[in-house]
Image (cartoon, helix red, strand yellow):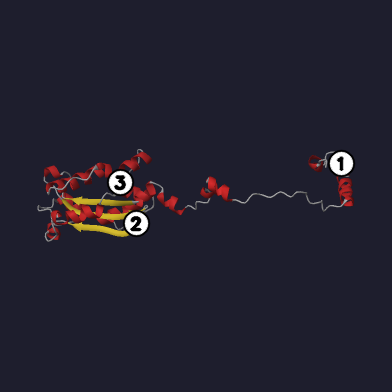
Amino acid sequence: MREIVLDTETTGLDPNQGHRLVEIGCVELINHFPTGNTWHHYFNPERDMPEEAFKVHGLSNEFLADKPLFATLADEFLDYVGTSTLIIHNAPFDMKFLNFELQRIGRPPLPMEQVIDTLALARRKFPGGQNTLDALCRRFKIDNSNRTLHGALLDSELLAEVYIELIGARQAGLALDIAEPLERPQYARRQKPVLQRPKPLPSRISAAEQEAHAAFIASLGENAIWKQYQYDD
């Protein structure tokens, strides 16, 4: 199963107010494990960077000036993502910007049905708790000390670890599944039948030993615990 953990950085909060995408970071998971296959690019937003946004991610006008336009890498991005499930924290925000950029260049939008929102997962699991990415890193003891500023690739790498913890995949991956084979009907059919002896083996205790044991028990008195385990042959 292939999943893509994704994060973006932008010039502001709303593309309908002229704000643009400036960074995408993606981390590939196969069966909930990072493969090392990432997709990361910065983009020239064709506009200035507001001071409020710069304080969040540190991407300046000068740094972004020579970066490619989103349009030049859109097909490469879509090929990388494919039909894989997208894992995004506060997905409506990122999807709003991604689909704005895609529609702007005549590409079809990515469907929300393709997305798992880890913020929604965290709110269901920890109702009333702090569920920012930093708060979840602290909760799961994930080292986010390098996150002095927001960055799409770093945040995707951290979110991948958070997501694995949220769905319990780390424990599932480490568990040794020893019970499963015993539950399968075909396992029982593969077992060799237990053979019964046609005639039981004779007792190895002699008659004299049995008599000595009985005499010993009798000497212990009527309340001896051994009396509870005596039985007739």
Task: Name the residue tied to disc 1.
Answer: 221
Task: Name the residue tied to disc 2.
Answer: 34
Q: Position of residue 40 (x, y in %)?
A: 23, 58
* Mark 1: few/some/many CA within 10 Å (<14, 14-19, 20+): few
Disc 1 + disc 2, Cβ < 8 Å: no
- Whether residue 23 is visible: yes
For mark 2, give the secondary structure: strand
For mark 1, give the secondary structure: loop
Give residue 132's mark. Answer: 3
Q: Quadrant of residue 24?
A: bottom left
Quadrant position of the C terminus in the picture: top right
Is residue 142 left or right of 65 when viewed as pictured?
A: right
- Whether residue 90 is visible: no
* Mark 2: few/some/many CA within 10 Å (<14, 14-19, 20+): some
Which of 192/50 is in front? Answer: 192
- Above or below residue 31? Residue 232 is above
Is residue 233 left or right of 88 when viewed as pictured?
A: right
Whole-number angstrom distance, CA of label 3 to CA of label 2: 22 Å
